[in-house]
Amino acid sequence: MSRRLTLAAAQLGPIQRAEGREVAVGRMVRLMETAHRRGAEVVVYPELALTTFFPRWYEEDLAAADYWFESAMPSDATAPLFAAARKFGIGFHLGFAERTPEGRRFNTAIYVHPSGEVVLKYRKVHLPGHAEYAPDRRVQHLEKRYFEVGDLGFPVVRAPVGGTEVNIGMLICNDRRWPEAWRVLGLQQVELVMLGYNTPSLNMENRGFEAHHLRVFHSHLSVQAGCYQNACFAAAVAKAGTEDGHELFGHSIIVNPQGEIMAQATSWHDELIVADCDLAMCALGRSTIFNFSAHRRPEAYERITAQVGSVVPPVWSPCGSGRDS
């Protein structure tokens, strides 16, 4: 039986700080309408899709940043998106800032069934940036201040997506650059990875020049390698354009299990890209080069989970260096 999925990636143009959630949700609903007309069965939206990328700004009192967080899902502001999903029979992935009833804060993504039920939740693990105000930076990147490290691991679930059952998992932004994250998903036979990002066109660390085209290349390289090495599809979906004076590079893509880009956004605005995904393509890599049960050697990988920072290797010296002359 053929297992096919029509997948849509809904890139968003910039969301300005002064704009309310109703503006972003209205744009997302229009993109979902377009996805319906083009036959899509699932739509993937970016990271922190409801607001501007607020970790650019420092708040000494964390409570002052609570405006940016969602304490319920669906909320009053996101209800139109859930209603549109029911109307069109489309599942969707949504990235947002989550504040739990206990007051914990996470950079979160969910996959929502067309019925409105949350099928899967993921909380970002690899938080970039810093926790305190950094006066030497042109732009702050305070994810470590506003979010805790995700506590849900990298879950995969088999769930209905359109007319077929699909093994789905999620990553968020910086997670895509860490092969360990992809491999944990791959070890659960993930078939579709949904991930959103908000990535600036410039590296703001001021530690050397990184060309714009290399920023895009490194993003795509990470996703393409993750898909190839774990035999899965992915939708990597961005915000793009100049947001509150800061440029986000966009270039959203859909990638197949052989690491090929199937579709790519070409604007810096709201844009929908669609690809027809044959899930049978996941079988080739999983049963040959990346047949984990046949070829993985976890006994040799202890350093990956036992060590955090890198260490200096031992220094080689000639065998006779310690002898008397």
Image (tube, grey):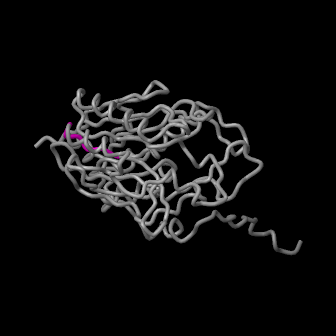
The magenta stretch spans which residues? 88-93
Residue 182, image x, y percentages: 41, 53
- Up the image or down, 182 lies above or below 324; here it is above
- From this view, report whether residue 322 is shown above or below residue 13: below
* Residue 8, image quadrant: top left
Identify the residue at image location x=59%, y=33%: 247
The outermost residue toward the right is 325
Q: Is residue 224 visible?
A: no
Q: Residue at x 49, y 65 (%)?
A: 104
User: How many numbered tags mark residues here?
Assistant: 0
Q: Foreground: 100 or 266?
A: 100
Horizontal and vertical percent for residue 166?
23, 50
**Residue 30 horizontal/vertical position (percent):** 33, 30
Give the answer, above or below, for where 306 lies relative to 79. below
Residue at 35% across, 52% down: 110
Please report the residue visible at 13 percent of the width from the left and 40 percent of the height from the top. Answer: 2
Residue 91 lies in the magenta-colored region: yes
Quarter of the N terminus within the rendering = top left
Residue with the most extreme front position? 76
Residue 132 as seen in the image, left or right of residue 290 = right
Q: In the figure, is residue 66 to the left or right of 133? A: left
Is 95 left or right of 285, judged from the image as shown?
right
Can you say whether 154 is above or below 170 in the image? below
Which quadrant of the structure image shows residue 24?
A: top left
Quarter of the image with the C terminus in it: bottom right
| Foreground of the two, 286 or 23 | 23
- Is residue 129 in the magenta section? no
Q: Nearer the viewer, residue 289 or 66?
A: 66
* Image x and y of residue 313, in percent: 67, 64
